[in-house]
Structure formats: structure tokens, C-alpha cells
Image (cartoon, rainbow, N blue to C red):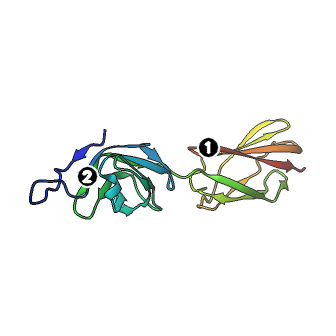
């Protein structure tokens, strides 16, 4: 549980200034990708002017005294969340884990080829592709992903795959994508 509390700010007569004292009791979810909305729980949260994910400024959303919605900022690494109302700063004990982005294969070129043909796959977040499988007419054939880049990678149509329609399945740590393909002889 991410909890921290700072003593309330008191005025000359010992009254609390600006409503509830700022406190940070928890947040959820505890992990997500860049762009995920995170709800912070505590008190005095409607006075928060800055939220940071491990030093990166987050976009503030709707708030009440008891909760504040923020968006995980671009390039934020995993780490604690810090809130501030301009006077008080509180950092969570727990870390928010930034999940890697989901890989997306948009296309393969060429769309047909014989065994030995080098194919170029394009899309997003492709540097972590772990496997390429051709589910061909005569069974599955694996190909080695090569030249992994964020927006593309290459693989060779495996030898032994029979002519006809095939389905290429690209696997990454978080998902799989299937693409139609035709094997020529």
C-alpha cells in the first residue's frame, strides 16, 4: 500500500488552511502503459497542482478531496508517484510499474513469396518480437525474427513450407498478431 501523510498546515489560530491536509494513501492500478489513467487516493487532493511518475510530469484530470485521476506521461519509467500542492510534496512508498507497449504488426511485404524470400514486417513497438511462425498447408514452420527495430523487422519464409495460403503468427512478450500470407513455389 502506498501511504504517506504530512501534518496539516495550520494558520495563526491553529486552523487548517486550504481544506483537508494533503495525504496520499494509495493509487490504482499499480501498473499500466503510458497513457493509462491512474486514480490517486488520499485527502486534500483537489489542491494538488503537480503529479510526477518517477520525475515525469503527469496530466491532471478530475479531482475531489479524496481522489485524483492522472494520466501516465510519455517516457515515464517505473517508480514512485509524487504529488504536490505547491507547499507539500508526498512520494508513494509503492512504485507504479510502466508496462511495455503492445506490439502491433500492420503489414508484411511482399504479401506472397517462396521459401527463402525475406519479408519485411512493419508496425509499432516491434523491437521485442520473439517468434515468427508460418502456419502453412503442410504444418507449422518457425522463422527467426531478424533486424528487430521499433517499427520493423525481417524474417525469411522457411524452407519446406508448401505452396498455398499461410497464416503468419508474430509473438511478443505481451501479445500475438496473425497476418495472412501466400506461399509460392
- Badge 1 local density, few (<14 within 10 Å), some, or many (20+)? few
The local secondary structure at tag 2 comes to: loop
Q: Is residue 154 left or right of residue 183?
A: left
Which circle, 1 or 2, is nearer the viewer?
A: 2
Q: Position of residue 58 (x, y in %)?
A: 41, 60
| Residue in the picture at 44% in, 49% down | 38
| Residue in the picture at 67% in, 59% down | 123
| Residue in the picture at 38% in, 50% down | 64
In the current view of this chain or complex, which residue is farthest to the front? Answer: 13
Q: Position of residue 156 (x, y in %)?
A: 73, 53
| Disc sitting over residue 18 in the figure | none
Q: CA distance from mark 1 to mark 2?
A: 40 Å
Q: Tell me the quadrant of the picture where the N terminus can be found.
A: top left
Disc 1 or 2, which lies upstream in sequence?
Answer: 2
Provide the residue designation for mark 2: 22
In the current view of this chain or complex, which residue is farthest to the top? Answer: 139
Q: Position of residue 13 (x, y in %)?
A: 9, 56
Q: Is residue 80 left or right of residue 134?
A: left
Q: Is residue 114 left or right of residue 64?
A: right
Q: Position of residue 45 (x, y in %)?
A: 33, 52
Provide the residue designation for mark 1: 175
Q: Is residue 168 above or below residue 120?
A: above
The local secondary structure at tag 1 comes to: loop
Q: Nearer the viewer, residue 107 or 131?
A: 107
Q: Nearer the viewer, residue 6 or 55?
A: 6
Q: Nearer the viewer, residue 170 or 69?
A: 69
Q: Which image quadrant for residue 88?
A: bottom left
Please give the count of numbered marks on the rendered protein. Answer: 2
Q: Is residue 114 left or right of residue 54?
A: right
Q: Is residue 131 above or below residue 124?
A: above
Amino acid at each position: 500500500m502506498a501511504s504517506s501523510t504530512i501534518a496539516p498546515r495550520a494558520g495563526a489560530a491553529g486552523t487548517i488552511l486550504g481544506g483537508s491536509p494533503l495525504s496520499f494513501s494509495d493509487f490504482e492500478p499499480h501498473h499500466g502503459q503510458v497513457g493509462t489513467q491512474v486514480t490517486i487516493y488520499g485527502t486534500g487532493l483537489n489542491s494538488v497542482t503537480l503529479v510526477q511518475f518517477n520525475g515525469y510530469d503527469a496530466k491532471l484530470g478530475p479531482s475531489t478531496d479524496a481522489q485524483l485521476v492522472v494520466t501516465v506521461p510519455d517516457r515515464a519509467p517505473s517508480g514512485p508517484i509524487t504529488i504536490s500542492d505547491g507547499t507539500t510534496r508526498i512520494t508513494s512508498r509503492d512504485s507504479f510499474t510502466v508496462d511495455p507497449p503492445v506490439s502491433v504488426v500492420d503489414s508484411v511485404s511482399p504479401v506472397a513469396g517462396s521459401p527463402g524470400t525475406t519479408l519485411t514486417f512493419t508496425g509499432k513497438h516491434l523491437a521485442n518480437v520473439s517468434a515468427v511462425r508460418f502456419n502453412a498447408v503442410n504444418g507449422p514452420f518457425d522463422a527467426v525474427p531478424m533486424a528487430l527495430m521499433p517499427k520493423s523487422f525481417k524474417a525469411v519464409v522457411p524452407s519446406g513450407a508448401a505452396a498455398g495460403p499461410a497464416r503468419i503468427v508474430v509473438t511478443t512478450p505481451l501479445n500475438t498478431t496473425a497476418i495472412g500470407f501466400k506461399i509460392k513455389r
